């Protein structure tokens, strides 16, 4: 390749210096420290007294029922959120993909919960999910009551709490996925759609043979991005349920957080964080593999 | 607090000494203070919740303070206050006040349901308590507020451990044994009977109203000294208070509260100790605090300043603290303990099996203890 | 006729979707005792609305200082991030130098590193750098670790790559140095991409939770999200105050988003896909 611009050798490094310095100090270095601590019995309040324990933290974690529970919960949450959110977002995108001006307003409406921060929404939905108590209740129970269904203790029952949090999370994130699908739809040529229509194919046929194949990159991106985001679940259960009832909403991140700041077990928590990182990295590799397959 | 600091600074103006208060965000206090300690963002003098003292001593963050007080002064402090600040025989923290838990009642609402409160300073047995709730419920009065909406763990451990102690149970053994102690059959029974209050809907397990007693909805209120002044203002003569219901032979009261410790890295411990002496001084420290929060003075000599500490509710606070005060366990693993025990209580209240909940909690806490001692 | 029906359906769906937020706004003005009573009908009950919750929340949650902290945090991250990320991206896209491929691979790998993994070691690292405590330090601790973001470097690099070669050749003719080219040719040419990054980062960092939760060790250094969480979890619970606090936490970002909305070009979002 030809030299693009004759410049002193130092110049690229000057451009890169601030970014490299900050990434090194605040990402790579802490990451390495975390990796080191994960192999020791480090105590949060006395990090200097850490002693090498090899893989002990990892093997203990993998056999700890509570850590497994946290993994199970988080995976369940992801399995509830990802398909529902992606499907909903897809059909919303098909629906609002129209040129008239007022559809823009509708798109903004679906996008609004993204703008409102997660802690605000966690607090708000805790109130919406309030159980029925002496004539007082939250909006959700009032709604389902108006169609004749009995009030529930959404966040207090082990089998309802995680689905309730998943529902709220789908509502929060669906607008963002919808925008990504919209962008995908807009790259679809009008001719593609028209051709399908002239051939006399029905709406379903058009969806299946024209739109879906063309949208595969967007769909894969949305699914995997949502999957990784779901595994990072923390603020909702931390604020809404404290991981309860009966550990039914305990997430991996909250497990790590409590192990650090309540148990003071820095080593063990670091091992949890490393396992989590492996998981996320695995999902990211999966995404790349899928994306490559689509392109070829 | 700020006023007290201002007074301290005025008095020490000439020496050029001043105290600067830093307030931690106080939700999930236990986490916050261990974050602050991990971050080395601790002041010279630190306010701690009683049961967390042991973890700070374990982490070598506090220094002994007995040398800043004379023996007479130390003897003036209530035994519960000294006990909560003592780890392995060494005193690390002292506070200005102790806490008290009682069952407040509204005389008029009890009378409406035909319930007679026990004579002063006497409490109900658990069965008497349930019977009273049943009569209230029959009279269409919500019986009792248990404040199950509290987001922190400490409320649950603090408010309901006395039931376990009154039945002769413990949360953790002296040797650090938890399995077989916390989930002992006696404790399981206590939790099972406790949960009846929620199963029969005598108390809300997911309340919306934070102060149903003050707002006139419940006849009883299971809470602490901090509500005394507000309840008195609302109820006046109608307000009564009795010890918490007991499951064993004798009443046991929760106690323990905020206290002050001197951090290991304090720049000048001798000067920092001046503040310690100031806040625990009957006139300069205890009177303003008690005047504001209605707690139990930490020092005997301070009672002279409070003429209303002879009659209920304040007289009862004092009586309980002197006769029935039981500090929460002193162990470096207290944050883990209270986290899992509180979860067991919350889950039991919502209908989970107490045996399973306590087993799970005991297993988690025991593992934590074992990992510390390096045993398998 | 059909169009009007379609439009009506759209309005109903949108209102239903936004019901939680509308409820939040409405309830934040209602008397405390009325917030959870009255069922669905209460949505249309506009009696006795008042501002007291806002006054109380402002004082109890120290919203003034909280909003200021959050504002400075986001401004710091956006400002420094814009400069540092685009500089790095420009170097990776427009300069040839040994080690470039390796660095770019590193950037790609760092994209997936979630903040949750870093929180604890980062807290201890930031402590060792002396960035814990008062206002200035906490602000630095909030901003510096998140100003540079691997994804943004990657994203901006793609846009710099797409610029035609003659753009900088003309500038070289004029005798411009590399920094001049970056600043007055490169940056203006990718303005839409920069706007996208700014808006997305603003949304992300305004709602930052877990990092402020650990790094804001003092009352006066809390960001607004932490102030809200504190009000929410600390007895006595006052629902109206919490709602008012939630609304005040949302308003600033809503206003900024409204102003910046036209810069969010949906197609920009998808650049990350390929």
Image (tube, coloured by chain):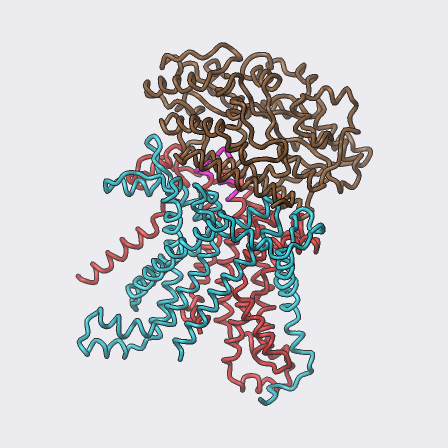
Chain colours: A cyan, B brown, C red
Could you say where residue B373 lies in the image, as x and y percent from the top left?
A: 65, 43
**Residue B270, image quadrant:** top right
- The residue drawn where x is 59% and y is 25% is B255
- Asked whether B259 or C161 is in front, the reply is B259
Residue segment shown in magenta: C229-241
The secondary structure that dominates the magenta segment is helix
Figure label count: 0
Residue A209 within the magenta-colored segment of the rendering:
no
Eyeballing the image, is B228 above or below B12?
A: above
Residue most extreme to the top: B119
Eyeballing the image, is A259 above or below A185?
A: above
- Asked whether C35 or B41 is in front, the reply is B41
Q: Is residue C247 visible?
A: no
Could you say where residue B244 lies in the image, as x and y percent from the top left?
A: 50, 20
> Looking at the figure, which quarter contains the N terminus of chain A?
bottom right
- Asked whether A18 or B57 is in front, the reply is B57
Residue most extreme to the right: B15
Task: Tell me: B24 left or right of B152.
Answer: right
> Looking at the figure, which quarter contains the C terminus of chain A?
bottom left
Residue most extreme to the bottom: A2
Could you say where residue C74 lies in the image, as x and y percent from the top left?
A: 55, 57
Task: Tell me: C38 left or right of B81.
Answer: left
- The residue drawn where x is 64% and y is 35% is B48
Q: Is residue A170 visible?
A: yes
Could you say where residue A73 lies in the image, as x and y percent from the top left?
A: 43, 51
Task: Tell me: C8 left or right of B264.
Answer: left
- Asked whether C151 or B19 is in front, the reply is C151
């Amino acid at each position: 390749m030809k030299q693009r611009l004759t410049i002193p050798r130092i110049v690229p490094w000057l451009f890169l210096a601030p970014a490299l310095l900050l990434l090194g100090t605040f990402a790579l270095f802490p990451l390495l420290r975390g990796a080191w601590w994960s192999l020791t019995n480090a105590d949060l309040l006395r990090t200097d007294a850490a002693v090498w324990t090899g893989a002990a933290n990892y093997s203990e974690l993998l056999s700890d029922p509570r850590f497994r529970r946290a993994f199970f919960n988080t995976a369940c949450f992801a399995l509830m959120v990802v398909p529902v959110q992606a499907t909903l977002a897809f059909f919303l995108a098909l629906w609002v993909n129209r040129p008239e001006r007022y559809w823009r307003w509708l798109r903004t409406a679906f996008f609004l919960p993204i703008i409102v921060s997660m802690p605000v929404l966690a607090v708000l939905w805790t109130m919406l999910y309030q159980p029925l108590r002496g004539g007082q209740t939250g909006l959700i129970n009032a709604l389902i009551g108006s169609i004749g269904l009995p009030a529930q203790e959404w966040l207090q029952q082990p089998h309802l709490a995680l689905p309730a949090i998943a529902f709220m999370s789908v509502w929060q994130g669906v607008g963002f996925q919808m925008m990504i699908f919209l962008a995908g739809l807009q790259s679809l040529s009008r001719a593609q759609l028209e051709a399908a229509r002239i051939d006399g194919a029905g709406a379903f046929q058009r969806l299946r043979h024209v739109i879906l194949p063309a949208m595969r990159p967007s769909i894969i991106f949305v699914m995997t991005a949502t999957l990784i985001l779901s595994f990072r679940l923390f603020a909702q259960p931390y604020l809404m349920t404290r991981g309860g009832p009966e550990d039914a909403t305990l997430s991996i991140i909250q497990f790590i957080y409590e192990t650090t700041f309540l148990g003071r077990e820095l080593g063990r928590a670091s091992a949890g964080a490393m396992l989590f990182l492996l998981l996320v990295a695995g999902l990211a590799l999966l995404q790349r593999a899928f994306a490559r397959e689509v392109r070829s | 607090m700020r006023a007290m600091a201002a007074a301290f600074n005025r008095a020490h103006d000439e020496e050029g000494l001043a105290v600067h208060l830093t307030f931690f965000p106080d939700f999930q206090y236990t986490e916050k203070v261990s974050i602050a300690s991990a971050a080395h963002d601790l002041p010279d003098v630190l306010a701690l919740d009683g049961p967390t003292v042991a973890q700070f001593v374990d982490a070598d963050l506090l220094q002994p303070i007995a040398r800043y007080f004379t023996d007479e002064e130390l003897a003036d402090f209530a035994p519960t206050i000294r006990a909560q600040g003592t780890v392995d025989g060494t005193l690390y923290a002292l506070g200005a006040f102790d806490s008290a838990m009682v069952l407040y009642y509204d005389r008029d609402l009890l009378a409406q349901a035909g319930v007679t409160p026990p004579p002063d300073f006497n409490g109900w047995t658990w069965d008497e308590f349930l019977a009273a709730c049943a009569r209230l419920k029959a009279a269409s009065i919500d019986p009792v507020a248990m404040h199950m909406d509290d987001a922190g763990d400490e409320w649950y451990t603090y408010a309901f451990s006395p039931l376990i102690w009154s039945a002769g149970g413990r949360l953790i053994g002296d040797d650090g044994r938890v399995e077989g102690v916390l989930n002992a059959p006696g404790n399981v029974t206590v939790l099972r009977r406790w949960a009846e209050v929620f199963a029969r809907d005598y108390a809300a397990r997911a309340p919306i109203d934070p102060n149903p007693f003050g707002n006139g909805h419940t006849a009883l209120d299971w809470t602490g000294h901090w509500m005394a002044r507000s309840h008195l203002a609302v109820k006046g003569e109608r307000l009564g208070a009795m010890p918490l219901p007991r499951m064993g032979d004798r009443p046991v009261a929760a106690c323990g509260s905020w206290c002050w410790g001197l951090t290991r890295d304090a720049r000048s411990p001798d000067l920092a100790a001046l503040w310690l002496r100031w806040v625990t001084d009957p006139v300069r420290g205890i009177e303003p605090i008690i005047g504001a929060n209605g707690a139990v003075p930490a020092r005997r000599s301070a009672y002279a300043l409070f003429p209303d500490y002879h009659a209920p509710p304040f007289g009862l606070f004092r009586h309980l603290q002197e006769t029935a005060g039981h500090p929460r366990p002193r162990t470096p693993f207290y944050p883990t303990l209270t986290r899992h025990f509180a979860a067991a209580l919350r889950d039991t209240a919502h209908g989970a099996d107490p045996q399973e909940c306590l087993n799970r909690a005991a297993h988690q806490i025991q593992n934590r203890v074992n990992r510390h001692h390096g045993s398998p | 006729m059909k169009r009007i029906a379609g439009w009506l359906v759209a309005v109903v769906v949108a209102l239903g979707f936004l019901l939680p937020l509308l409820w939040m706004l409405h309830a934040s003005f209602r008397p405390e005792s009325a917030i959870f009573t009255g069922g669905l009908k209460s949505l249309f009950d506009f009696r006795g609305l008042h501002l007291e919750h806002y006054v109380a929340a402002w004082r109890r949650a120290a919203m003034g200082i909280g909003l200021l902290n959050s504002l400075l945090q986001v401004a710091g991250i956006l400002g420094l991030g814009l400069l540092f990320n685009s500089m790095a991206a420009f170097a990776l896209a427009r300069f040839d130098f040994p080690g470039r491929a390796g660095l770019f691979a590193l950037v790609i790998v760092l994209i997936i590193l979630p903040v949750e993994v870093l929180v604890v070691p980062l807290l201890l690292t930031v402590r060792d750098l002396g960035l814990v405590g008062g206002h200035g330090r906490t602000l630095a601790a909030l901003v510096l670790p998140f100003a540079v973001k691997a994804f943004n470097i990657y994203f901006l690099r793609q846009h710099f790559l797409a610029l035609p070669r003659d753009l900088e050749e003309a500038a070289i003719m004029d005798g411009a140095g590399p920094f001049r080219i970056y600043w007055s040719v490169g940056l203006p040419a990718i303005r839409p991409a920069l706007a996208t990054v700014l808006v997305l980062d603003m949304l992300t960092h305004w709602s930052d939770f877990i990092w402020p939760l650990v790094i804001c060790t003092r009352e006066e250094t809390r960001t607004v999200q932490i102030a809200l969480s504190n009000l929410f979890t600390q007895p006595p619970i006052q629902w109206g105050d919490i709602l008012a606090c939630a609304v005040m936490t949302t308003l600033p970002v809503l206003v900024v988003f409204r102003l910046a909305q036209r810069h969010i070009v949906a197609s920009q979002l998808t650049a990350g896909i390929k």
